[in-house]
Amino acid sequence: MFGLRSRPFLVLVAIFIVLSVLVNEKITTDFDRNTVLYFQSIAGNHALDLTMWVITEIGDVRWLVLFSIILLIIRRTRRIGMIMLLSLVAGTIGAGYLKGYVIDNPRPELEFLGSELPYEIAQDTFVLGTNGSFPSGHATRAAIVALIVGYALSERFPRGRYLIWIFPILESLSRVYVLQHYPMDVFGGVIFGTTLAAIIGNKLKLSQIFKKSQT
């Protein structure tokens, strides 16, 4: 995992700041709106609509917190579960605060024209009285899971660990597909989640999982 003073970490922080400014200043509005209009127009395939709904629901805080608690209960994965749980809670609260009080970017107001879904899609806004959109909480949590699980698998599966990043990619795509977020929201969420997980992982010494597995 990259250190807090490493170049990759500083690059991620810089990218997130730039994205935040671009979104807040409405520079990306046309791109964002045109993209969600396109996704609104292609909805209607029942299998695809349902698949995207399932993927977006997996990113709900309840399911991922439950997953981290299961890891926390298992002795061999206790450190991973603890770091993931703290990162998910911090990421959810942090994303909620940013989109509620810092970044001025309301959610898409377009109607989903696809198939009827089993139940209404949750917006995942945890700041009362706001309807902010940047960064996406679902994308934030998906990136957190990908970074921590990917790092945990890095010693046994040095190449295959990168496949876990399919999760935040699909999660981000699903949030735009169901018209809950703009593209810049999910880009920002992935970067925010990755950065936050790196900070917490370093502070809580996620690297110790390898030392414990060797003893």
Image (cartoon, rainbow, N blue to C red):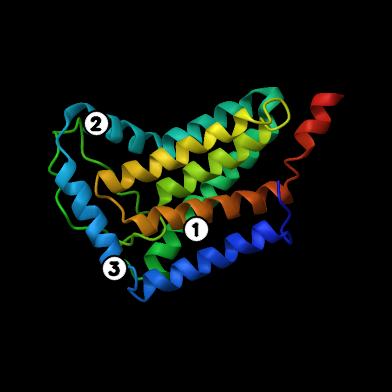
Residue 59 x %, y %: 41, 39
Q: Determine the residue positioned at 19% across, 54% down.
A: 37
Upstream in the sequence, badge 3 or badge 2? 3
Cβ–Cβ below 8 Å for labels 3 and 2? no
- Which of the 4 quarters of the picture holds residue 25? bottom left
Looking at the image, do the residues carrying marks 1 and 2 touch, with CB atoms under 8 Å apart? Answer: no
What's the distance in space between the residues labelled 1 and 2, CA to CA?
A: 31 Å
Mark 2 neighbour class, 10 Å CA radius: few under 14, some 14 to 19, many 20 or more:
some
Residue on which disc 2 sits: 48
Residue where numbered disc 3 is placed:
29
Residue 122: where, in percent of width, then height?
28, 44
- Give the amino acid at mark 2: Leu
Q: Amino acid at mark 3?
A: Thr
Image x and y of residue 60, in percent = 39, 39
- Is residue 161 rendered to the left or right of residue 106? right
Task: Give the residue number, with chain letter if any, for mark 1.
Answer: 94
Q: Going 71% across and 51% down the picture, which residue do you hit?
A: 2
Q: Is residue 11 left or right of residue 44?
A: right
Judging from the image, what secondary structure is the residue with disc 3 in? helix
